[in-house]
Every structure is written in C-alpha cells, then in structure tokens.
C-alpha cells in the first residue's frame, strides 16, 4: 500500500512540477508583460525546433534492435485504433447526445490527445527512456493524419477541406524520414569520442530540453486569457473530459492487456506505457485551432481543452500508478 501511494505521489509531484512551468506564462500574460503574438512565437519554437530535435535525438539515442522495429509496427497499429478508432466511437456517441455544431467539437475534444504539446513533456518528466519517446512520436504521426483528414471533415462537414498534404507532409512525419536511417544504422553518435560529434549531440540535447518547458508556458498564457470560472458550467464539457481522461485510456489499457494474454505474444512494457500515456493526455490544443479556423463551437473547444488539462493533473498520476500496480512499470 505504501509503495503504491509513493508511486502516485511521485507521479503527482512530477506532473505538478511540469504544470508549474505554466506559471511564468500565466503571470506574464496577466501583468501584460508579453508582446502581441507571443504565444504564436512560442508555439513556433516548439513545433519547428524543440519537438523535431527531440524526435531526432530520441532515434539517435535509442539502440537499434529487431524487437524494437516490431514494436514500432505495433505502436503504429495501436495508434490507429486509439486515435482513429476512438474518434469514430466518440462521433457516434456525441451526435446522439448534443446539438450538431457542438457535437462536432466534442467528438474531436474527447478523442484527440494533446500528445505533442503535453504528452512528450510528461513522458520526459516521468520516464527516462528513448524507446517510450519513439513510440509516442509514432502516435503523433497517426494523430496528425487523423487530425487533417477525419478531424477536419468532422468540424466542417465538407470533404473539400481535407488536407492530404498537411496529413502526410508535416514535421513529425518528415523527421521520421530523416531519423529512421540514422536509427537503423545504429551509429552510436551519443557515445562517440569525436569532439565534433559530441558538440553536435550537446547542441541537440540543448534544444531538446525546451520540450518540458515551452509547451507549458504556452498553456499558462492560454489560461490567463480566459475566465477560469466559465469553463466549469457546461455539462457536455464534463462528459468530454470524462471520456477523454478516463473511458478511452481505460479502453486502451484493456485492449493492450488482452493482447498481452495471447500465448507466445510478447507485449513490450515500454510500448504499453507510451500508448497509455499518449491516450490519457487531455484534449489536443489543435481542437481550438480547428474550431477557430472552420467556424466551429469555439467556446466548447476552449472549455474542453482547458478543463481536461486541469483534471489531467490528477488522472495522469492515477494511470501511472495503475501501470505500477499491474506490473508494467
């Protein structure tokens, strides 16, 4: 019992510290010390600099093994189930319980995870394992494809807005194209004694370190821009948070547990951890962007994103503890 409590409290503390990185952004926005467009600048640094460098460095750091390659395939297949599959389930459910425009946003908010802006930082804070990060990056690729195809179609109701270019030609996908050959060659660059290579790895690590802080600062700025009381007065938003943070992660864990019971089938623990953490993340911030771009229910998108983020401070440690209890960690 004490060991379980320690796991929960440790995870809670680490997630709490991660969320605390949002304070500078929140405070600076509240006292009006940030210039116009600061949030866009910070988002650009995350999307175009720190996250691509994290992806590249994770593949450089990981040691190539044939089992890892097979697990990457499993990660891809599971990601399709946990992103596209849960999206379709959410679509059926929410179109039965709420009005059309809001149902479209609720579908996105309950099924699409903030796997990039929050999932990667959480994985970095809780786990020191490049393999877990690699599986999360594969999850991100599937997320992007789903976002710009099913997601855009759901919010607009029109196939003409589907962007195959954005679905396939995005940074997570392009970085994988560059990183995979380095991974397969197993060059051991992080252990090199060559001063030039060592300097390049130091450069990569430096940019990589922004992943734990910049996304949270962005979150803090967003929180400062709205009335926090207003996010807790909508029944549908509570349902979205419950489905996103409890129902779908439990379903993901159940599916992976069933696979692990198959005789002669070895399910890697790091893969299970990565897929569950990505599935358990709060609503993707891109839900707000799509609602704003395509005239969706912006209020429901903002409320769902922020409420699920607030509740995830508690639910993420609970799932980490559950993983420890069933012997995955």
Image (cartoon, rainbow, N blue to C red):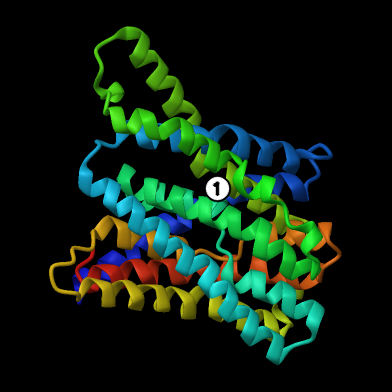
Task: Identify the residue shown where x is 39% and y is 65%.
Answer: 276
Q: Characterize the local packing of mark 1: few (<14), some (14-19) or many (20 or more) Cα atoms within 10 angstroms.
A: some
Task: Identify the residue shown where x is 41% and y is 17%.
Answer: 200
Task: Identify the residue shown where x is 48% and y is 76%.
Answer: 248
Q: In which quarter of the view is residue 253 placed?
A: bottom left
Q: Position of residue 322 (x, y in %)?
A: 30, 73
Q: Is residue 119 visible?
A: yes
Please determine whether, in this image, residue 47 is positioned above or below residue 141.
above
Q: Residue furthest bottom?
A: 97
Q: Is the C terminus in the top left, top right, bottom left or bottom right quadrant?
A: bottom left
Q: Is the N terminus in the top left, top right, bottom left or bottom right quadrant?
A: bottom left
Please determine whether, in this image, residue 32 is positioned above or below residue 71.
above
Please determine whether, in this image, residue 55 is positioned above or below residue 189.
below
Residue 118 is left or right of residue 271, and the answer is right
Residue 131 is left or right of residue 52, and the answer is left
Q: In which quarter of the view is residue 296 placed?
A: bottom right
Q: Position of residue 297 (x, y in %)?
A: 81, 71
Which residue is nearer to you in this view: 199 or 228?
199
Which residue is nearer to you in this view: 206 or 56?
56
Query: Please, what secondary structure does the residue beneath circle 1 have?
Result: loop
């Amino acid at each position: 019992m004490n060991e379980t409590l320690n796991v929960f409290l440790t995870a809670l503390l680490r997630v709490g510290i991660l969320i605390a990185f949002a304070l500078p952004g929140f405070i600076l926005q509240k006292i009006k010390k940030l210039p116009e467009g600061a949030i866009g600048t910070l988002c650009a640094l995350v999307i175009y600099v720190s996250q691509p460098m994290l992806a590249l460095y994770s593949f450089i750091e990981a040691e190539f093994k044939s089992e890892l390659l097979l697990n990457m395939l499993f990660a891809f297949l599971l990601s399709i189930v946990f992103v596209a599959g849960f999206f379709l389930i959410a679509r059926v459910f929410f179109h039965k319980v709420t009005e059309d425009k809001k149902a479209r946003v609720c579908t996105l908010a309950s099924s699409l995870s903030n796997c990039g802006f929050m999932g990667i930082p959480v994985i970095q804070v809780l786990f020191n394992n490049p393999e877990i990060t690699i599986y999360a990056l594969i999850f991100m690729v599937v997320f992007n494809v789903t976002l710009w195809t099913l997601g855009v179609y759901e919010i607009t109701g029109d196939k003409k807005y589907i962007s195959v270019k954005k679905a396939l030609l995005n940074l997570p996908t392009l970085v994988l194209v560059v990183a995979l050959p380095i991974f397969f060659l197993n060059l051991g660059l992080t252990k090199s004694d060559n001063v030039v290579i060592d300097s390049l790895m130091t450069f990569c690590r430096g940019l990589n370190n922004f992943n734990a802080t910049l996304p949270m600062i962005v979150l803090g700025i967003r929180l400062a821009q709205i009335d926090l009381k207003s996010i807790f007065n909508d029944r549908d938003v509570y349902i979205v948070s419950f489905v996103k943070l409890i129902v779908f992660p439990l379903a993901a864990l159940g599916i992976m547990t069933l696979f692990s019971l198959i005789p002669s089938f070895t399910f890697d623990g790091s893969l299970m951890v990565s897929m569950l953490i990505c599935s358990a993340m709060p609503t993707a911030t891109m839900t707000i962007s799509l609602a704003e771009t395509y005239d969706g229910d912006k209020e429901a998108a903002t409320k769902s994103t922020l409420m699920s983020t607030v509740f995830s401070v508690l639910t993420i440690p609970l799932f980490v503890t559950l993983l420890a209890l069933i012997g995955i960690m």
